[in-house]
Amino acid sequence: MTRQRLLRLKSVLDRRQPDLTVLMENVHKPHNFSAILRTADAVGIFEAHAVHPTGGVPTHHDTAGGAAKWVYLRVHPTVEAAIAHLKARGFSVYATRLSPSAIDYREVDYQKPTAVIMGSEKWGVSEEAAGLADAEIVIPMVGMVQSLNVSVAAAVILFEAQRQRMRAGRYDRVQLDAETYHRALFEWAYPEIARELREKGLPYPPLDDDGGIVWPEGALPWTSS
């Protein structure tokens, strides 16, 4: 770990937005799933959410460009459980859906805690998810097609959220709490050691100004392979 690398990691964490997220409901094509994660990283999302029929996540790292390493992903057993989890944390949930009641996606106030549901490639957001969402949003289309590719639609909406938040100065101050910040920084900087410590049930030690691990007295220093 070099000081330059440490500063790079911290500069990204300094801009992470824990109260902005995306929920992928049965997005099953790997390139779409990974492209959404790549966009999530680009706009500063800290944790994304997914519901997948198999319980797994179809990431494709060539498309994600390594973004899967930098955006935490929480997989839920059902869309009902996912939305309940988000609402319990204070998120307003918006379903992307072509319907008479849908509002223009630009009318949403993304400065508030916001979760955007992106549906499966063929069927879109399910009736169950739409019924549990706070509102439905749509990207206005004036051509022959009615909708965009799911990963493109996610990018359009999330970059509008970024625009609003940048204008409000939300990226100018750290949004993560100190404990979450340290946990993420340690896991990003030392993933192998972090995994060993988790397996042993041990806390992450602090890092010094140069990114070195400050081991507690008497502790055995692990080294990543």
Image (tube, helix red, strand yellow):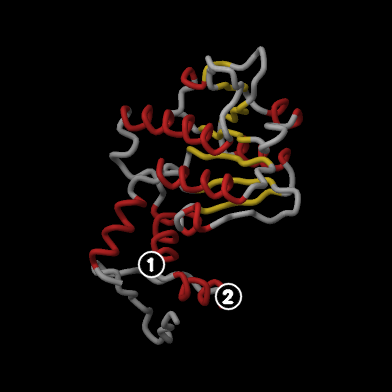
Residue 42's mark?
none
Q: Which mark is residue 189?
A: 1
**In the displayed structure image, the side of residue 39 where residue 98 appears, left or right:** right
With 23 as the anchor, is 43 left or right in this view? left
Question: In terms of depth relative to the viewer, which is nearer, 53 or 223?
Answer: 53
Q: Residue at x 44, y 65 (%)?
A: 187
Q: Which callout, 2 or 1, points to the residue nearer the camera?
A: 1
User: What's the amino acid at mark 2?
Assistant: Glu
List x then y, in percent, for residue 191: 46, 70
**Residue at the image point whose x is 42% and y is 33% from the top:** 159
The image's mark for residue 199 is 2
Name the residue located 46 percent from the left edge and 28 percent from the top edge. 110
Say what secondary structure mark 2 lies in: helix
Looking at the rendered structure, the kind of residue marked 1 is Ala
Rate crowding at label 2 as few (under 14), some (14 to 19) or many (20 or more) other CA atoms within 10 Å: few
Spatial CA span between label 2 and label 1: 17 Å
**Count of number-bearing discs:** 2
User: Residue pushed farthest top?
Assistant: 100
x and y percentages locating residue 164 in the rendered image: 38, 27
- Picture quadrant where residue 128 is located: top right
Q: Is residue 56 above or below residue 43?
A: below
Q: Label 1 neighbourhood size at 10 Å, few (<14), some (14-19), many (20+)?
A: many
